[in-house]
Amino acid sequence: MTSALTLPSGGPLASSRPEKPTGSQPLPFELDHLLALRVPGLIETRRHIHSHPELSGEEFETAALVHRELSLAGLKPRLLPKGNGVICDIDGRPDGPVVALRADIDALPLSDPKDVSYRSTVEGVCHACGHDVHTAVMLGVGMLLAQLADLGQLDGRVRLIFQPAEEILPCGSLEVIEAGGLDDVVQIFALHCDPNLPVGKVGLRVGPITAAADNVTVRLTGPGGHTARPHLTVDLVDALGRLVTEVPTLISRRVPANSGLLLVFGHASAGTRYNVIPSEACAAGTLRVMDRDTWDQAPKIVAQVVRDVLAPTGATVDLEYLRGRPPVTNDARAIGVLTAATASALGPEGIAETPQSMGGEDFSWYLEHVPGALARLGVGRSGPNVDLHRASFDVDERAIEVGVRLMVQTALRALAAAR
């Protein structure tokens, strides 16, 4: 597995493998033995990817690594048109169904402060959302399923999708779909790291498991001037203050409370001097909402409230509302497959209920085309956990083996159910 990699040296691997849970079942055809041999290499691969992160849309080296490793496993991966993602079919029974498994591969624009041997070597870029784990897990799944296919024991075709640009808009999932990633697929599954769950637990939920997420940018312009004479200007600092404090509250009054609509500005800027009223100001943030109907209405609601709030200020308003992604809505049958797979891989105690989060995930666009489900993979470490999208985020690497075992079981059960 690691023969084609230049890997970081130093630092112990995971100290121990997860204990085999009561009630779990072995993988078929002695794949447990093969997995045990592969786990150290998968951990090293995860650490290599963590040390060499790439921003959304720029995942060329990561995609090349994935392509190389799948090729070494005897598979025939193909790069996406831009070269920053990979699709790979594992061909089993030719008349069987096609099931897809997706991993995202991009990193975030954050500096890595961790004191570990696999700390990011790229300034200002860090795997703070676990996509390095997702990638390593899916490589392990590919190796095991390739073995089953060679033995003639794969009941259809499994498509591995290594997707770029999950963290930005436009979403990378749309590139995959345009490239034919969902052609003939009957179900699709994915995992996402969850630091709030311990290793050995998998969070499952029927229905919406994430929120819709859009980007909102408001640019204000007007004649600036001296702070001694604001009546001769349009006071954009005042207008900006009204925008960021009043608009989020007012839009929440236009929709049902249980829709969970939330507008939060993460950026606001205006001016450079204490005694000069600026001629430009800007605020940008995300709008998140838990149900699809309210998401469909959100652009009109935001536009109306922004106009109403800012009209008295005299500012010229340019509103950019960028549609992001709908909620990930898990199909009940697909969750049934994941539930059975979790029980097989981890025993019944591995199944955990999980709430709908306000985070966005572009896996939702796949589910607009085919049924499927996203599960949360427990990666919690001992001591206080660090949330996703913090630069200091890290995982318990024993979760990699758990993830491989779970997704192999998921693929096999999904193929059997689709026959």
Image: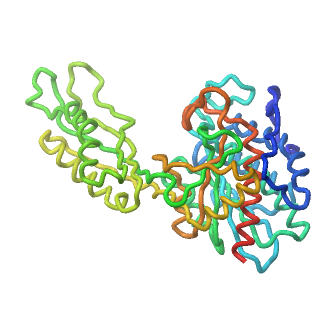
354 left or right of 219?
A: right
* Residue 291 can be seen in this image: yes
- In the rendered image, residue 220, in percent from the top left (x then y), is placed at 25, 40
Residue farthest to the bottom, as pictured:
95
* Residue 304 higher or lower than 274, as above or below: below
Q: Is residue 392 left or right of residue 44?
A: left
Q: Is residue 108 above or below residue 366?
A: above
Relative side of 190 to 287, left or right: right
**Viewer-side residue, 195 vs 216:** 195
Residue depicted at 64% across the width and 52% down the height = 191
Nearer to us in this view, 298 or 317: 298
- Residue 93's spot in the image, x, y percent? 81, 75
Q: Looking at this rendering, what residue extends furthest in the left direction?
A: 231
The x, y position of residue 163, in whole percent, is 63, 55
Look at 19% across and 38% down and name the residue there. 222
Residue 122 is situated, as x and y percent measured from the top left of the image, at 65, 32
Name the quarter where the C terminus is drawn: bottom right
Q: Total marks drawn?
A: 0
Left of 287 or right of it: where is 279? left
Q: Residue at x 87, y 52 (%)?
A: 32
User: Residue 159 falls in which quadrant of the image?
Assistant: bottom right
Color theme of the render: rainbow
Q: Residue 88 occupies which quadrant of the picture? A: bottom right
Q: Is residue 188 above or below residue 256?
A: below
Q: Can you see residue 109?
A: no
